[in-house]
Image: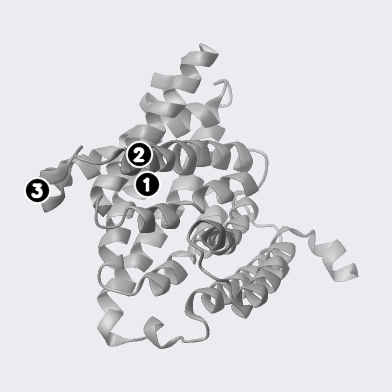
Amino acid sequence: MILAVFSWSFSEIIVKLIHGAVGALTLSFFRFTIGGLFLFLVLVAKRDFSGLISIIKNNLGLFLISSCFAFGFSNIIYFIGVTFTQANIAATIYTTYPIWITIYSIFLLNERKNLKFKFLGISIGVVGVTILMTHFNFTGLFSLEYLLGNLLVLIGSIMWSLYSVLGKKIQQKEPEISNSALKYSTLSSLFAAIPVIIILPFTSEFQTFLIYSAYEWFWIIFLGVVSTGLGIWLLFEGISRMEVSKGMSLAFFKPIFATILSFFILSETPTITLLISILLVVISIILINQNPKSLLKN
C-alpha cells in the first residue's frame, strides 16, 4: 500500500510538468489506457488469462459501476471541479476519500472493527492534510467563489471511494481466479477510459490529440505505467491482504510524498507545515490501524 501511495504521488507533479501541453481529459485517457495495456503485458508475461471474462460476466453491474463510474467518470468530475477552485483546496477536499471508503466498507464489506479509533484517526489525518495544503489559510474551503468547484471535487472524491471497495468485493466473489488483483486492475483501467474517450472528441483538447513532444510523451507514459497501472495493481494487492479502510488510511501519506518529490523534482521548498502534517498523519494512521485493546492499554 505504501508503494502504491508513493507511485500515485507523482501524478500532480507530472500534471505541473506538462501543464498547457496536454489537457486534463487527454491525460486521463492516456493514464487509463497506457496503465491498462501495461498490466495486460504483465498478464501476457505470466501467461495467465483465465477468469478475465468471468470477472466481468459474473459481476457486470458492480464492475461497470467501479470501473466506468467510480474510476473513470469520477476523474472527469474531479478535473472539472479543479478548474473552478484552487488546486491546493481541491487536493485537500479530494483527500477526504478515506472517510467515504471507511463508510462504504462498513456496509459493503462489513468492516466494523475499531470504528471509533478509525474515525478519530481519519479526522486527524484530514486535519493534517488540510494544514499541509492550505498553510492554515482555510478561507478557500468555505468561499462562495469556489463553491461549485469544491462541491464537484467532493463528489469526485465520494465517487472514487467506491472503486477500491467494489474492487475488493468483486475479488472476494471470485476467490478461485488466480492473480485476481492484477486482472481486475487491468480490466478496470481499460474500462475507465471509456467515459473519457466518449467526451474527449467534443472538446478543444481533441485538436492536439497525439501531437506531443518526446518530453511530454515520456511523462504521459510514466503517468500511465507507474502512477496508474502499477499503482492500481499494488493497491489491490495491498487491500487483498488487509481491510480496505486500514489500507487506504496510508493514502494520507500521498500529499506528504508529493511535497517531498516536489522538492527534488520541481525545487519547491517544503515548509514547517510539512512537519506538522507528517506528525498528524502518523498519529492518524497509528489510530486507524492499531488494535483497539492494545491501543487502550498503551
Picture disc at residue 32: 2
Colour scheme of the rendered structure: one colour
Q: Quadrant of residue 113?
A: bottom right
Q: CA distance from mark 3 to mark 1?
A: 21 Å
Tag in front: 3 or 1: 3
In the rendered structure, are the residues bearing label 3 and label 1 in contact, judged by CB atoms less than 8 Å apart?
no
Q: Is residue 62 visible?
A: no
Q: Secondary structure at mark 1?
A: helix
| Placement of 28 over or under 86, stated as above or below | above
User: Is 247 placed left or right of 52 in the picture?
Assistant: right
Q: Residue at 41% across / 61% down in the picture?
A: 157
- The numbered dot on residue 71 is 1
Q: Which amino acid type corresponds to the residue marked 2 in the rendered image? A: Phe
Q: Mark 1 belongs to which amino acid?
A: Phe
**Which residue: 37% across, 67% down?**
154
Between the C-alphas of marks 3 and 2, the distance is 19 Å
Mark 3 secondary-structure assignment: helix
Query: Relative to residue 25, is residue 49 depicted above or below?
Result: above
